[in-house]
Amino acid sequence: MTKRIGGFRRKTGSKLSKSPRNKGKISLTKYLQNFNNNERVVLHADPGYQKAMYHPRFHGKPGVVVKKQGNCYVVNIMDGNKMKSLIVHGVHLKKA
């Protein structure tokens, strides 16, 4: 058997990088934004904050906020024909 090479963020340099204009600290308005239940959002990872980040394969997918769980949100997305629920911090979400 061969050894598994690569981890969670392998080959994601273009997805998880900011433009030079947006590099630096996360703005407080983005960090503290609130979402309501049944609100439509788009998964858009912020590489400056790694906690509660979803898997990069879901980058750019639309979803629906189901509930708040601690500081994060439970978001339902469709992956093919299957409904999946992700626990994502609000920093990684954009209103659709």
Image (spheres, rainbow, N blue to C red):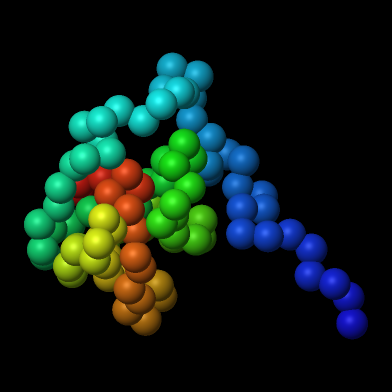
Question: Looking at the rendering, in which quadrant would you find the N terminus?
Answer: bottom right
Q: Is residue 71 above or below residue 46?
A: below
Quarter location, residue 37: bottom left
Task: Name the residue rendered at 53%, 35% in the picture.
Answer: 17
Residue 35 placed where, x, y %?
A: 14, 52
Residue 66 can be seen, yes or no: yes
How far across and how far down the image is residue 36, in percent?
Answer: 10, 57
Q: Is residue 64 visible?
A: no
Tally the marks: 0
The residue sitting at 32% across, 44% down in the picture is 91
Which sits in the foreground, 61 or 73?
73
Q: Is residue 47 left or right of residue 1?
A: left
Q: Is residue 21 left or right of residue 87?
A: right
> Is 70 in front, or is 82?
70
Q: Position of residue 19 (x, y in %)?
A: 48, 25
Considering every residue shown, the one lying at the far right of the view is: 1
Name the residue at 46% across, 23% down.
23
x 35%, y 68%: residue: 86
Q: Which residue is situated farthest in the top direction here?
A: 21
Q: Is residue 46 left or right of residue 75?
A: right
Where residue 24 appears, as percent x and y from the top left, is 45, 23
The relative height of residue 47 versus residue 20 in the rendered view (above or below) is below
